[in-house]
Image (cartoon, rainbow, N blue to C red):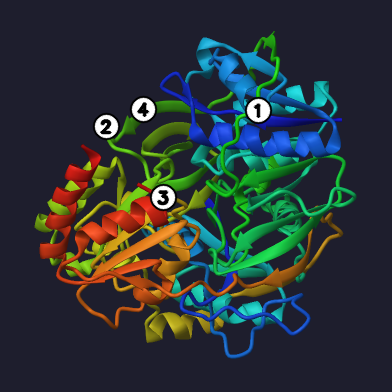
Amino acid sequence: MSILIYTESENGMFKKSALELASYARAIADKLRVELIAVSFNHKDHQTLGAYGVERVVQISDPSLENFTALTYAENLASVALANQVNLVVLSSSANAKYLAPLLAVSLSAGYASNVIGLPESFDYLTVKRSCFTNKAYNTCVLDNDINILGLSTNSFGINENHKEILVEDKSANLTKTNFEVERIEKSSGQVSIADADIVVSGGRGLKGPENWHLIEDLASTLGAATACSKPVSDMGWRPHSEHVGQTGKPVASNLYIAIGVSGAIQHLAGINSSKVKLVINSDPEAPFFKAADYGVVGDAFEVVPELIEKLKAFKS
Amino acid sequence: MKILVCISNVPDTTSKINFTNDSKAFDKNGVQFIINPNDEFGLTRAVWFQQKQKAEVTVVTVGDLSCEPILRKCLAIGADKAIRIDLNPTDGFQVAQQLSFLCKEENYDLIIAGRESIDYNGAMVPGMLSALMGYNFVTNCVVLEIKDNFAKVSREIDGGIETVSCQLPLVIGAQKGLVEEKDLIIPNMRGIMQARQKSLTVLPAIESDVKSVITKFEKPAPKGAVKMVDPNQIDQLIDLLHKDARVI
């Protein structure tokens, strides 16, 4: 018996979600007294993983793995899982992890629960709580299979250091020939992605037009935050779809979510519900968002936000 | 080109979410059901292929009789025919397996499903279906072009867009962006009348496996009251975010 995690890296660094995954799986490994194995692709920084509780890392390196492809990555994870009698695989909720999870589940005949929000409630029959109805509810789910896969919700467990002596194993890649080719990747440069951000600053119709978005962008850059928007804003083309957060857009699970001029429709609230702290700035004291907020400011965004930016800059320095 | 669009019957996005007294099921009382929005983006793109590239569009759902109104709506939107696989499914794997039985019979070139349903948010059916069929798969799909036997597909990744090319058959996890909100088709009277004449076939479920069982639903604990800060006291706001919430 052992636990496997897929630790993702970007620009030569493990992603924060990979460290959260290691911390989470460490807690399970301690409880079950089993080994925790990490798999990383084209990345050799095992010390970092050791600091968060990983005992063994399988490094798979091959130039053809440079671009993520769900099928090839899933195949390689499956082969490590089978070679090590893994009975629990834990994945993050990144776009790539959610992409490969169902493929891995079929390949291992495993059960799969996504959006898991905490440690399993029971291991006799693996029982986990997960969010559903776009964060408007939770369900408890029992997975009674030889191998199970859990997808951990971003920012739901936290990162804990836990130093272990780490064993490094190099493994050659399984490469099946496919007719599937990654042609290009366009990254929005210099911006924090909503998925990885600690802080997200979001604007709604209250900003009156795309020409006023510098307020959102300035506040976001002051805080090192990602920018987001409400559905009407993306539908009107003020901002790209990739910034739309809510039920049909992206989920946000940041530490701080700042909503400016967003009224707080139920679909929007659902999408940002798993953010830890919500600050709402709106000129309408009746805006429904205040009911879901932790901190609220009733005021004109065009006055409050510039002052907030200025004072935050002073605070940061 | 034969296209299959997999449809999920979900509560309207504005629904209040409640559960039955034993917490074991979603309380459907007074709830209006709609086509899962991610599926509807996919269906709209499929109808575009039907109109521009002579594709044949079939919609399918795995569900009981109560799912038929949304299948009729799909027909009114433009799908050519509908199939209901008669099973109230227990989990996503079971849905994927049921769909795979149909796909093995029909050999669709393109299978479109929403990247996830907005009720269970499992995000597993399209991926599992592709794996069961051995087909190519792209999820979070925001661009889909097809020429002859080749697809060019873009998917949203964390912080960007990735574009891939691959051969059909292909399974797509659709989401907003694949078509714009304004492109969504509101059925007109002619479409609704035509939908009545189109075929809606009910297929019996084939024995399939279940990998997970939901034992309980619950709602989040009510949250504490909002702390209001005077707009002239921005220093106090920063102080609260720093010392009270510890997020900056």
- The residue shown at (18%, 43%) is A313
Do the residues at pointers 2 and 1 share their chain?
A: yes
- Indicate which disc residue A162 carries: 1
- The residue shown at (57%, 67%) is A133
Question: The disc labelled 1 sits on which kind of residue?
Answer: Asn
In three-dimensional space, the C-alpha distance between marks 2 and 3, rounded to whole angstroms, equals 28 Å
Name which quarter of the figure residue A129 lies in: bottom right
The residue pinned by badge 3 equals: B246
Q: Work out which residue is located at the far right of the displayed protein and give it.
A: A124
Q: Residues within 10 Å of mark 2 (few under 14, many from 20)?
A: few
Judged from the image, the secondary structure of the residue bearing numbered disc 4 is strand
Judged from the image, the secondary structure of the residue bearing numbered disc 2 is loop
- Indicate which disc residue B232 carries: none
Q: Residues within 10 Å of mark 1 (few under 14, many from 20)?
A: some
Q: Is residue A244 visible?
A: no
In this view, B110 is above or below A179: below
Sequence-wise, which precedes: disc 2 or disc 4? Answer: 4
Question: The disc labelled 3 sits on which kind of residue?
Answer: Arg
Do the residues at pointers 4 and 3 share their chain?
A: no
- Indicate which disc residue A189 carries: 2
- Residue A306: x %, y % from top left: 12, 55
CB under 8 Å between discs 2 and 3: no
* Image quadrant occupied by the C terminus of chain A: top left
Q: Chain of mark 4?
A: A
In three-dimensional space, the C-alpha distance between marks 1 and 4, rounded to whole angstroms, equals 38 Å
In this view, A86 is above or below A205: above
The residue pinned by badge 4 equals: A184
